[in-house]
Image: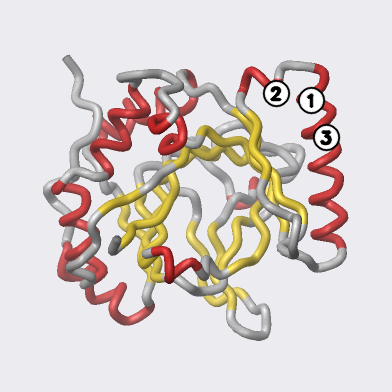
Amino acid sequence: MKKLFEINPDLDRKALAHRFADRTRVQVRDVLTDETAREVQKILLGGTKWGMAVQAGDGPGNDPQSWRLEEVRTPEGAQAINDAANAAHRASASGDYAFRFAHYPILTAVQERWEPEGVHELLLEYINAPQFLDLVREVTGIAHLVKADGQATLFAANQYLGRHIDSHVAEGWRVAYVLNFAREDWHPDWGGYLLFLDEDGDVIEGFRPRFNSLNLFAVPQSHMVSYVPPFAPIGRVAITGWLRDR
């Protein structure tokens, strides 16, 4: 039986910790063994029931909206998503916060028993296992991280995540993570980069959605996922979420 999730034993954890301490963010390349990274990629690309997540504005009444795959496939769901996407585009055009991307909310799926004992539930267990949490604790220097949530994300053509800061520190959010399993040939022209910005809106660092890499960054800090253009292929997939101290 093939292994599903195994940390690469050859990571230079001290060097990674030094970089995180210096910049409050780091990309850990080749974070899993190659065999298990390919297994996760196969699950995300071929075995995930992608729904949609959209938000248009961050004011009162502009909460994020989510649709399951079963809803996406109905005429009513498709219309609702189209309306929400148009609203998101208008919000972005006015400089307000918005996003639009495909997702599968793993934690919600586990809590609501969408696919009992399914493979995504197992992935969430691995992300909360000592091997992964200990790696993150060692790299970030935050010893009291106790758990992680997670969702699978797919940024396809015309999708993006607007600039924001992840300010939910009061809810226990300490470190955001992105486990990238994008196509290995992901080209810069295809967008989908994790970008960090300063107070003037200038990009100060950016991470390509490199296959088998783990992005870690302390929150809050200003960041976004750049727009994926219409000519980009399907393949910018990841598991994302926050590591918490409670």
- Mark number displayed over residue 82: 3
On the image, the x and y values in percent for residue 46 come to 48, 19
- Helix, strand or loop status at disc 2: helix
Disc on the earlier residue, 3 or 2: 2
Instruction: Give the residue type at disc 1.
Output: Ala
Q: CA distance from mark 1 to mark 3?
A: 6 Å
Q: Which residue is mark 1?
A: 78
Instruction: Say above or below: 181 vs 35.
Output: below
Q: Which residue is mark 2?
A: 72
Which residue is at a point 52% across and 66% down the rendered structure image? 166
Horizontal side of 75 relative to 214 (left or right) equals: right
Which residue is at a point 22% across and 38% down the rendered structure image? 33
Whether the residues at callouts 1 and 2 have beta carbons within 8 Å, the answer is yes
Q: CA distance from mark 1 to mark 2?
A: 5 Å
Which residue is at a point 75% across and 16% down the rendered structure image? 74
* Crowding near the residue tagged with mark 2, few <14, some 14–19, many ≥20 C-alpha atoms within 10 Å: some
Disc on the earlier residue, 1 or 2: 2
Instruction: Give the residue type at disc 2.
Output: Val
Q: Which sits in the foreground, 10 or 50? A: 50
